[in-house]
Amino acid sequence: MASLQSSCKVLNTPRHHTSPSSKSFTAKPSHLLTHPNRTHRLQVSCNNNEKQTPEGKLDRRNMLLGLGGLYGASSLASNPANSAPIAAPEFDKCSEARDVATGDLLDVNCCPPYSDTIIDYKLPRFNKLRVRPAAHKVTKEYLAKFEEAIRRMKALDKSDPTDPRGFMQQANIHCAYCNGAHDQVGHANLDIQVHNSWLFFPFHRWYLYFYERILGELIDDPTFVLPFWNWDNPKGMQMPKIFDNTNSPLYNTNRNQANRPPAIIDLGFSGATDDLQKVVNNLTVMYSEMVRSVNSTLDFMGQPYLDGDSPSPGMGSSERGSHIAAHVFVGDPRNKYSEDMGNFYSAGRDTIFYSHHANVDRMWSIWKTLKTDVPKEINNPDYLNASFLFYDEKKQLVRVKVADSLDHRKMGYEFEKVDIPWLNYKPSKKAAKTKIRKIPSDAKKAEELFPLTLNNVVRVLVNKSAKGKADEVLVLENIETDTTKFIKFDVFLNDEDDKADELDRAEYAGTFAQVPHKTKDKKGRSTINLKLTDLYEDIDVADDDTVVVTIIPRSNGGDVTIGGIKIIPSPTKSA
C-alpha cells in the first residue's frame, strides 16, 4: 500500500465558497426554506456507502478497495482523484423531514433559519480557560445558572421560533446535519453526514462550542460552560441526577424510565444484571476503545470522508462504542423511533445530549494525550479544511473549519480533572495458554460460514498471518445492517469460558454498534478493524497459527450480515 499511496497522491486545493456580499440578516420561517430544485425527502443517511454515487459515478473508495485490499484503502490519507474537503452546506436548500421506512412526516422541520450573510469565524483570544465540570459534582450555584440558561433558551421557542439560538433550533442542528437536510455542495441528492467518519469529533466539538456560548449570552455570563456526563468513571455511571428532577428545565420525559438513577449504564450492552459486573465491563470497554483495540489514527477517529463520497464510510472505536451506548441507554423505548436520545434526528431535544457529547469531546482530548504508538493527529488538508455552518451567540451565521477545532484549549475551555480509572484497566492475563483444541467443536472455518447472518453466537477458525504473538489486526468486513434497528455485537478470541455478560476478560477483542437511523435503502455498510497485538500477549497464543473468533450478538443479530473475516498484518498507523 505504500507504493499505491505515493503514486496516487495529488496536491489538494481546497474549494472555497464565496459568501454573498449582502450584509442584511433575514430569518425566514423554516417551512419556507424548501428549495424548488430539491426533490428528495429528509432522511438519516448514516450508513449508505454504496458502490455508486447518486450521479452514477464509481465511488473512488470502492475502486481503491479493489486495487489495494480492504484495510489498506481505508487507511489512505485521501482519495487520489479529484479529492476535496466536505464543504459547508447551503442553508437556502432544504427539504421536509420524513421517515424513509414508513414515509411518516416527522414532527419537526430541521431546516435552519436562513441568512444571506456568512462570516468566516475566527476564534477569539481567551485570557483564561473555562473549566467544564463533571455533571455529578456540580455546585448548587452552578446548577441554578445552568437551569436558568436552558429556561431562557426554551423561552425563545415561544417568543421567537425563528431565533437560531432557541432550544428547538439548536436541537435541529443535529437533525439537519445527520438527517439529509443538507446536500453536499455541487452534488444534488448526496447528503452531508457528520456521523460515521472522521468528521464526527470536530463537528460535535464545534456544535457544543456555540451551544455553550449561546447559553452564556442568554444569562450574560461569558464564563459559562457545559457539564460533562462522566460515564467513564464509576461515580458518574448513571444519568446525572441534575437531569432527573421533574421540576427542572433539564428534565425530559422522553427517556427510558427503567434507566433513571440509580440505574448503572451498561456501555457494553453485555446484559449483566449485577452492578459491579456492569462497572468492570464499562472500564473494559473504555480501555478497549481508547487503547487496546486501536491500531491506527483512523481506527479511533473514523474513516476519511471527502467531497462527493457516499455518507458514512466508517465509525471510529469511540463513536461506535460508549457514544452509542449512552444514546441507546437514555432513548425512550415507548416512542416509535426511540426519541429523544435514541434517534439522531431527535437527540438534541434532550438536555443530557449536550453533556453526553461533552464527555465524548473529553474522550477525544484524553486520547490525544495517551502514550501509544498511534499518531494522534490527521494532517490531511481534506480533513483540516472541511467546514460547517453554525449560528453564533450574536445570531450571526458563521463558517468554521475542522482545523480550528483540533485543540480544545484554543477554543477557551478545559475539563475538570477527575480520575480516569480505565486508563490502566488492562484485563488479567490468562494463567495458562489457551488450547484451541479445548474450545468447543462447533467452531468452523471462515469459508464454511461467511457471508453469514448473525442469528446466533458464531465461532469461527481464522488463520493468522504469522505464528504466535504477531502484530496483527482482525478485520470483519462488509457488515450490512438494518439501519432502523439498534445493532450490537461483541467479538472474543480463543474464549473458553463463554461468559457472555463478562467483558472484563483477556479474550475480549472489541465491539460493533449502531444507533437506529434512516437511510434511503435501510441498509448500513461498514467494516471494523480490531487490533490484536496486546490481546495476544494477554492470552498467550505461543506458536498458534490459527485462532477461534467468537461473535456474540447483543441486539438484533438477525438484522446483521457479515461478509467476511480475516487476520492481516498490522497496517500503517498514521492517517
Image (cartoon, rainbow, N blue to C red):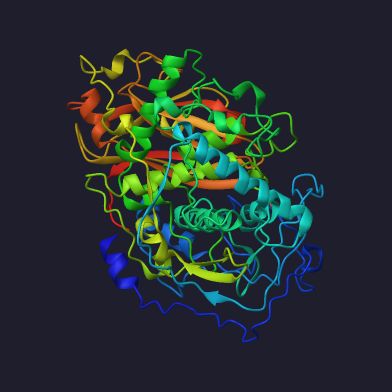
The image shows residue 509 at horizontal and vertical percentages of 36, 31
Say which residue appears at 35% left-offset and 49% top-offset.
Answer: 365
The image shows residue 567 at horizontal and vertical percentages of 33, 39
Quarter of the image where the C terminus is located = bottom left
The answer to whether 550 appears left or right of 367 in the picture is right
The answer to whether 21 appears left or right of 276 in the picture is right
Viewer-side residue, 254 vs 301: 254
Viewer-side residue, 437 vs 482: 482
Say which residue appears at 79% left-offset and 65% top-offset.
Answer: 29
Residue 144 occupies which quadrant of the picture? top right
Viewer-side residue, 437 vs 163: 163
The answer to whether 387 appears left or right of 289 in the picture is right
The image shows residue 288 at horizontal and vertical percentages of 35, 34
Q: Is residue 231 above or below residue 142?
A: above
Q: Is residue 170 above or below residue 426?
A: below
Say which residue appears at 42% left-offset and 68% top-offset.
Answer: 124
Say which residue appears at 60% left-offset and 24% top-offset.
Answer: 260
The image shows residue 68 at horizontal and vertical percentages of 36, 58
